[in-house]
Image: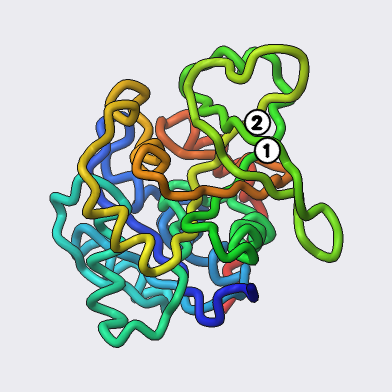
Amino acid sequence: MALPRRPIVIIPSRLAATRLPKKPLADIHGEPMIVHVWRRAREADIGPVLVAAGEQAIAAAVRAAGGQAVLTRPGHPSGSDRIFEALESFDPDGKHDAIVNVQGDLPTIEPACVRAALAPLTEAAVDIATIAAEITRLEEITEPSVVKAVVAFTRGGSGGLPPIGRALYFSRNPVPGGEGPHYHHIGLYVYRRAALGRFIRLPQGVLERRERLEQLRALEAGMRIDVARVDTVPLGVDTPADLERARELLAGTKPKA
């Protein structure tokens, strides 16, 4: 099966954050963080980029930079619910057949990683695609904040496709056991349009509540998630220290029109 013909990138963003208040608007070299994420997504060049904004201030910041934003209800329980509302508002006729969900706190995400996330959808049975990178720092294997993807990469790796495998589980614990690599799951998802509509209507799963991982809801419901392997893990900005690190990594970057 060919890749989706008309993907769209949607970035969910809201101001509520306990460790870094108003973080989408945090300044990084003269521009709000959400604008940096929007620029990285545009550089992936896979389709239009839309910000699903929980508040008017976020939408205004994106539009001031020349981007598109849709104002959504502020109280959504998850980014998946937010992007679905934005999608239905922006594209009520269903022209876009795949939705790339890029988190709004990844200002250093590499455009190549965004493109790689589409690759698993070459397989018709895949409902949701995501990405992971091999863990190289041993302490991350036991760190609960680093989610591990349990996956054997059995296809791809040539012909322009990254290594791809079917996700069997996701956990905050060091799984699987035995000798071999562990993979750091990166929370960037690509949904087939029908899969996104199904996913947001599913009840919360038992394992999802136990692990506090939303993607387990899909696996519990029998949905298929495949993973593309990438080489780098983007910096997620959750704290003031993360923000300073992002500023260091993005030093010298110039906005692209």
Task: Determine whether the residue tagged by mark 2 lies in a helix, strand or loop.
Answer: strand
Task: Say few, some or many: other residues with alpha carbon within 10 Å of mark 2 (under 14 / 14 to 19 / 20 or more).
Answer: many
Whether residue 30 can be seen here:
no
| Label 1 residue SS | strand
Position above or below: 99 against 13: below
Q: Locate residue 97, reporting x and y percent.
A: 45, 76
Residue sitting at x 27%, y 62%: 53
Which corner quadrant of the image does residue 179 belong to? Answer: top right
Q: Looking at the picture, does residue 156 appear above or below residue 210? A: below
Is residue 189 in view from this perspective?
Answer: yes
Provide residue 110's location: percent of width, then percent of height.
Answer: 65, 55
Rendering colour mode? rainbow
Query: Quick one: label 2 or label 1, which is nearer the N terminus?
Result: 1
Above or below, comparing residue 1 to residue 167 in the picture: below
Q: Horizontal and vertical percent for residue 76?
A: 18, 51
Q: Which residue is mark 1?
A: 133
Q: Is residue 235 left or right of residue 155?
A: left
Alpha carbon separation for disc pair 2 and 1: 5 Å
Q: Where the C terminus falls, by quadrant? A: bottom right
Name the residue: 61% across, 47% down. 227
Q: Position of residue 188 (x, y in %)?
A: 50, 50
From the viewer's perspective, tell me whether residue 199 is left or right of residue 237: left
Residue sitting at 27 percent across and 38 percent down? 17
Q: Amino acid at mark 2?
A: Tyr
Rendered residue at 40%/41% (across/down): 215
Q: Nearer the viewer, residue 96 or 236?
A: 96
Quadrant position of residue 186? top right
Return the residue at label 2.
183
Between 142 and 233, the one lying in front of the other is 142
